[in-house]
Amino acid sequence: MLDGARPSADAREIVSGICEGLLAAGVPVERFALFIYTLHPNLQGRRFRWLKGEGVDQSDADLKAFDGAEYHDNPLPTVLRTGKPLRRKLCDPGSPDDFLILKQFREEGVTDYVVQPLFFTTGETHLVSWATKADGGFDEEMIAALEKIRLPLARLAETYMLRLNAANLLSAYVGRDSGNRILSGRVHRGDIEEISACVVFADLVSFTRFSNDASAEEVLARLNLFYDCLVPPIVEGGGEILKFMGDGLLAIFPISDEVDERTACERALEALSVASGGAWTPVFSETVPPFRAAVHIGPLQYGNIGASDRLDFTAIGPTVNLAARLLASAVLVDGQTVVSERVADLAGLSKAGAPSFELKGFDRTQVIVPVREMPKS
């Protein structure tokens, strides 16, 4: 542990190695749990649990996990509050039965249960617990061994948490793929690569008028509802949200060895179909605010752009420009979703009667295809 638990970077392997090492050293650990409180928009924390003979599992606690009686009638909040270890020697008839989980442990044959605080250099407190089924519980030498590894365990847990928080926050603020690229070292201005992708722009209909008249709370609720409609199906379809822009968003569906151009277009259109009510034609309602969207496909530049010390990981290029122009022109064809001629061909959409327009910045006229019905897969 002092050596950094090399060579594995997998937290589950590190946990397993620690517990198996303790068993080999004569400490009869039956159950181990590590509780780490994380920075994440939807989660409170992460638990790693090791059970003898079963290995390690991982679970995440959502934002409501700590609101119920099950959490508060548990030793964890007590140790967090006091910053002191807590031990219940369950094989001792006089051991207090003051937490709900202790009854469960007794029924499972646990004889001793210890919760220790893990103090991070930031001042935060996280938790680890140990349990045994050995006759007589942990002896004093075993308790000393658990205490001895507490400090190096805290350093390992903090190192893991810092990486986890960085990944969570980058994913939340710049997108999953962009965040992974940043963590892997793509952090310099000009770190750009050319990729091919299906580009999606979308924005709310009549949002300017609405936001001018509505309260701040109503505006925020409308925006969050809009993003809750669009973001999940885009992400589930393999898309990457690159940017929120007021009442709009920019997303891409990258082309790869596993995803060809046709598939990327179909996934983008399917995501928009789900977002607009799940039907082949839009079904806007109180829970699905009206929006417009535009889809184009082609090569683009993807990476770091900005000032020397303030960068944005985004996409630029003619493909992105045309998608933006298509969105601005959707009103000209009374379209909720419009696509370029190339996307229409790939997705098998009818171009009958589709008009052509001169779009700012483009030399030739562009066909704008309104999508009256989403293609059926």
Image: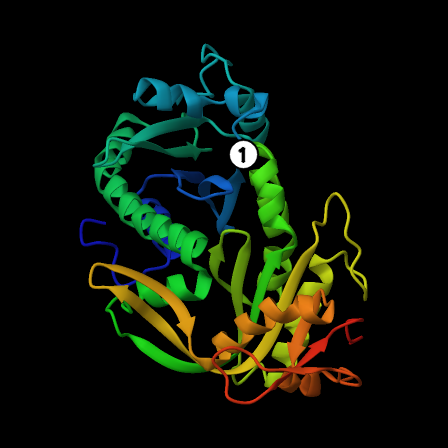
- Where does residue 24 sit, x and y in percent of width and height? 32, 49
For label 1, the SS is helix
To which quarter of the image does residue 330 belong?
Answer: bottom right
Foreground residue among 264 and 92? 264
Foreground residue among 37 and 220? 220
Residue 47 to residue 333: above or below:
above
- Where does residue 27 sit, x and y in percent of width and height? 33, 39
Q: Is residue 275 left or right of residue 198?
A: right
Q: Is residue 239 visible?
A: yes
- Where does residue 162 sit, x and y in percent of width and height? 30, 48
Q: How is the image coloured?
A: rainbow
Foreground residue among 129 and 298? 298
- Which residue is painted at 55% across and 79% down in the image? 359
In the current view of this chain or complex, which residue is farthest to the top?
94
- Circle 1: residue type: Ala
The residue identified by callout 1 is: 216
- Which residue is painted at 43% across and 56% down in the image? 171
- Which residue is painted at 43% across and 39% down in the image? 33
